[in-house]
Image: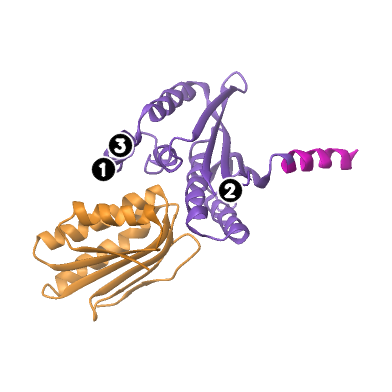
Amino acid sequence: MVAQEIMQHYTVAKSAQILMMFKGGLSQNIVVDLGSLLQNRLGFDVKVRRMFGIFVELAQNVKNYSAETEIATDGTEVGIGILILADSGTHYSVNSGNLVRNADAERLKSQCQHLLSLDKAALKAYHEERIESDPPEGSKGAGLGLIEITMKTGGNVQFDFAPFDEIHTFFSITATVEK
Amino acid sequence: MDSLIINQTSQTPRVVFDAETGSGEIIGVSFPEHANDFYAAVHEWIDQFFVEFPEKSLHVAFNLNYFNTASNKELRLLMKHLDRLYNEEKSVSMTWFHEDGDEDMEDVGKGYSVSLNVPVSVQAV
């Protein structure tokens, strides 16, 4: 029975061409360790670095904004979520998933729609505007992560939402870059 | 004046600023949890340098192959700090190194060389 279950996980991971998957609390130390694992596995050439940049932004997004949290070993409260890195042969796809409060999901949806509506020049201008101003209310970073991911993928990013329970929505980001 | 020396880690760059030679280097990757705290020491050192040695020159070399968005913002603040000093007639210059073929990093350096008054030399390595 156990082997059947593990084999299912294995088969899913294999058919989805998964290089790495992590589910849990994303403290800064875990983000750094996953980054090292990734570099050990793939090296750090310019293409990998572009993917790595997206990976770090997604990981730090989950850490800072997931509605599901735990206390990490360093004593800080960190977000819980899932990160999946897959290699299709020609592209890397970096995925993140975490819970958000239903009330925040609406705001997030309109923010994502806005990003996807911008062309390259408008994205660059928006990035410039944001980097020059104070971080948005409630932001724990520079408030630039989603803009940067949209820029780095050339718009090849999907923001998706699924109902989770009465108060939470599951928020996923799938970013794809050429290898 | 003491040198500023911060050893490289897997999330922060190696930082070396030497008052005697009037040179600074920031080398490696940058994605610390609190980027503003990390770069605060560099801002302080630079201000102190020009208090103690107003007539000296300072050259700062940036040689980074990856930084996250929060570090990007902090690096920009550092660049602007150096630009302010240059505009106050301090002798300041910079070199922005990027790996040959890394267009993202090259673009960042070229952006600075266009938008700032302080001389920024963009060089492939």
Question: Which comes sooner in the sequence, label 3 or label 2?
Answer: 2
Q: Position of residue B34 (x, y in %)?
A: 41, 52
Q: Position of residue A23 (x, y in %)?
A: 65, 42
Question: Which comes sooner in the sequence, label 1 or label 2?
Answer: 2
Identify which amino acid the numbered label 2 is placed on: Ala
Query: Closer to the camera, A44 or B103?
Result: B103
Identify by letter the chain in purple: A
Using the image, name the chain to which the residue with label 1 belongs.
A
Using the image, name the chain to which the residue with label 3 belongs.
A
Quadrant position of residue B105: bottom left
Q: CA distance from mark 1 to mark 2?
A: 32 Å
Colouring chosen for the image of the structure: by chain
User: Callout 3: 10 Å neighbours few (<14), some, many (20+)?
Assistant: few
Residue identified by numbered label 2: A72
Mark 3 vs mark 1, foreground winner is: 3
Identify which amino acid the numbered label 3 is placed on: Ala
Q: Please, what secondary structure does the residue beneath circle 2 have?
A: loop
Residue B61 sits above or below residue A77 on the image: below
Q: Main secondary structure of the magenta part?
A: helix
Residue at 39% across / 63% down in the picture? Answer: B100
In the image, taking residue A120 as reference, residue A108 lies left or right, namely: right
Identify which amino acid the numbered label 1 is placed on: Glu
Quick check: marks 3 and 2 in contact, CB under 8 Å?
no
Q: Which mark is residue A132?
A: 1
Quick check: marks 1 and 2 in contact, CB under 8 Å?
no
